[in-house]
Image (tube, helix red, strand yellow):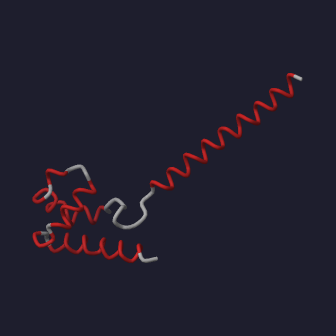
Amino acid sequence: MIQIRRTYLASRLSLYYRAIAAGIAMTAAMLAPVNAYDRPPTSEEKDACMEDVFRLCSSLIPNRTAITACLRSKQDSLSRKCRYVISRRDSSEKSSGSK
């Protein structure tokens, strides 16, 4: 009788841990970047825009989303390289959003 209870409890505990693991995996998948706008910048993109970030949006560091919005709002003042990076990210966002 005791052996049956231990086996039953072990199987229930195993199910419990599997449910927790599945919940964690689903949460991680939901928080993953969905499109180019959400993904972190590559090292090339950072290099292209670093000077513009410090010159135009330094008060927003380290908020990546706010920095990107700041750069978008000041496109006329951006360097040519950074303007290209921002426009490429915007076009990637539009193409991935239309799927």
- When asked about the image quadrant of residue 54, the answer is bottom left
Residue name at image x 80 percent, y 27 percent: 6
- 36 and 80: which is toward the camera: 36
In front of the other: 51 or 3: 3
Percent across and percent down for residue 33 are 42, 60
Q: Is residue 66 above or below residue 1?
A: below
Name the residue rendered at 35%, 75% in the picture.
Answer: 94
Q: Quadrant of residue 95?
A: bottom left
Residue at 14% x, 62% y: name it. Answer: 52
Q: Position of residue 7 (x, y in %)?
A: 81, 31
Q: Compared to 57, does 74 lie above or below?
A: below
Tally of numbered discs: 0
Percent of width and height locating residue 53 = 16, 59
Q: In the image, is 77 to the left or to the right of 94?
A: left
> Residue extending furthest top?
2
Residue lying farthest right? 1
Residue placed at 18% from the left, 61% from the top? 70
State which quarter of the image contains the N terminus.
top right
* Left/right of residue 18 with respect to residue 26 in the rendered view: right
Horizontal side of residue 7 vs 63, given as left or right: right
Expressed as whole percent of the image width and height from the top left, the position of residue 30 reads 49, 55
61 in relation to 39, above or below: above
